[in-house]
């Protein structure tokens, strides 16, 4: 503060003897008006003590008493702490002010309006922060009311708020055949974010995390044998801020019946049908009261076999392709008709649909003219036979595939997954001398029903 002077008054021209804080005696001469000023340093509290006074004109003197004290109060101090980095939504981090007890600290947040906070008797105060966005507390000044001392102060504390990954992106549900592979797709992932699939029951990690790429990422799980729910933990690589995605993945497991015609490639070629799920092969969720014949078995995927017998060992080593009967010898005339006995059970209370195909031209597809041989919709009662129109041109002396599908779903096509019923595959071989097909021998290679 500005220095405070000591002022002496008395007899004009008198010499005053004094000391400071009891130290060495010193003199000061009053002027003609009886006044003198002692300039003080004011660096510390000090007291000027009068000792004596002498009139130099009359040589008269006497001891005198009296004193004046300048008390130097310490300037109040203040500081602020709380600099840290947290994730959005984390427990709030408070700013802590410390300094001279009972001092009033002036501060602003991010350069805004000046605000005050009073330190308690121990020299502390706490500012509860909202921590919704990165913010900085800047000190401005500090004042102690009891001494009226104040001074500007500097210092700041910054709480940096790192964002969380986006929690609202979609996570796919899926259904899978018992023992098969399930794919869980996370859509619109963020670059710089890792995604960890977790068991929803206890948040335990399932497999390795996958890095976001700005698009979709896919978790593959195999084999899947039970219905389960998964959640996904998203974590920023740089900040480690994490959030559980709002959406969850439910994998529903069904016992499935699948096909077993030969399937060597993803294409459809002669002797190469779509049977595996990866190639679009058919699958049916097995339900009570809807099946072909008496037997139905469960597979995790198609069971390709050159004789269409890939799944015959799945139910007590029996041939479960028992819904359609092919006699050992069929009288087939190009452009003629054959009758096939069928055995259909439908106690679901809803209409069921029986669709069937024969690969008459032997190209590995069921899309040729007249290759859809059966398309029946019925309730609990299906006919005992189906009548099949034979095309004018058919493959002879080679194995050709036959596929029947039964479901509550209509318009199934020979491929893809439906939620009910059964599929049965057969291989037959029509032995026909060139240009002669009346009658012919038809060798039944048997088949599989999935």
Image: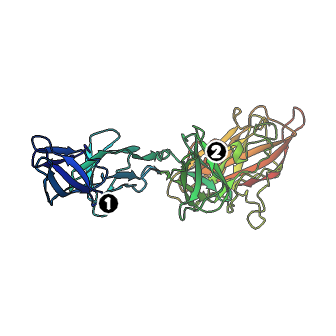
**Left or right, 358 with reference to 137:** right
> Would you call the spot at circle 2 few (<14 residues within 10 Å), some (14-19), or many (20 or more)?
some
Please, is residue 189 above or below residue 63 in the view? Answer: above
Q: Nearer the viewer, residue 303 or 404?
A: 303
**Left or right, 196 with reference to 319:** left
In the rendered image, which residue does mark 1 sit on? Answer: 123
Q: Kindly give the residue lying farthest to the right in the view shown.
A: 433
Label 1 element class? loop
Which dot marks residue 334?
none
Q: Residue at x 37, y 55 (%)?
A: 94
Q: Residue at x 30, y 54 (%)?
A: 44
**Left or right, 85 with reference to 385:** left
Can you see residue 181? no
Whole-percent x, y for residue 298 in the image: 68, 60
Q: Nearer the viewer, residue 426 or 225?
A: 225
Q: Residue at x 59, y 54 (%)?
A: 197
**Left or right, 60 with reference to 350:** left
């Amino acid at each position: 503060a500005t220095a405070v002077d000591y002022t002496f008054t008395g007899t004009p021209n008198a010499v005053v003897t004094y000391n400071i804080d009891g130290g060495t005696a010193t003199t000061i001469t009053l002027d003609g008006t009886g006044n003198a000023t002692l300039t003080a340093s004011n660096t510390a509290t000090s007291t000027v003590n009068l000792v004596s006074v002498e009139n130099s004109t009359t040589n008269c003197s006497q001891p005198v008493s009296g004193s004046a004290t300048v008390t130097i109060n310490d300037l109040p101090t203040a500081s602020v702490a709380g600099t840290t980095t947290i994730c959005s939504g984390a427990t709030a981090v408070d700013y802590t002010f410390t300094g001279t007890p009972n001092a009033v600290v002036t501060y602003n947040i991010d350069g805004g309006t000046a605000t005050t906070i009073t330190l308690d008797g121990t020299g502390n105060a706490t500012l509860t922060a909202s921590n919704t966005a990165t913010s900085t507390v800047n000190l401005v000044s500090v004042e102690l009311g009891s001494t009226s001392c104040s001074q500007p102060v500097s210092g700041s504390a910054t709480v940096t708020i790192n964002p969380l990954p986006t929690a609202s992106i979609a996570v796919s549900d899926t259904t899978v055949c018992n023992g098969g592979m399930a794919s869980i797709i996370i859509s619109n992932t963020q670059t710089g974010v890792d995604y960890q699939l977790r068991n929803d029951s206890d948040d335990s990690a399932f497999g390795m995390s996958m890095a976001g790429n700005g698009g979709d990422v896919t978790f593959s799980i195999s084999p899947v044998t039970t219905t389960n729910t998964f959640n996904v933990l998203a974590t920023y690589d740089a900040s480690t801020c994490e959030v559980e995605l709002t959406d969850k993945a439910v994998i529903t497991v069904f016992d499935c019946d699948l096909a077993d015609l030969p399937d060597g490639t993803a294409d459809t070629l002669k002797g190469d049908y779509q049977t595996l799920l990866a190639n679009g092969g058919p699958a049916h969720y097995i339900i009570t009261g809807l099946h072909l014949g008496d037997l139905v078995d469960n597979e995790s995927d198609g069971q390709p076999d050159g004789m269409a017998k890939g799944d015959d060992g799945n139910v007590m080593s029996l041939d479960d392709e028992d819904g359609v009967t092919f006699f050992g010898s069929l009288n087939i005339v190009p452009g003629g008709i054959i009758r096939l006995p069928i055995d259909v059970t439908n106690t679901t209370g809803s209409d069921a649909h029986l669709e069937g195909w024969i690969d008459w031209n032997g190209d590995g597809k069921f899309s040729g003219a007249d290759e859809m041989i059966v398309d029946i919709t019925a309730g609990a009662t299906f006919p005992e036979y189906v009548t099949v129109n034979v095309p004018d041109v058919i493959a002879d002396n080679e194995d050709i595939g036959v596929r029947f599908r039964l479901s509550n779903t209509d318009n199934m096509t020979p491929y893809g997954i439906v939620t009910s019923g059964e599929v049965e595959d057969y291989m037959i071989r029509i032995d026909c001398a060139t240009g002669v097909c009346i009658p012919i021998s038809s060798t039944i290679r048997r088949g599989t029903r999935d």
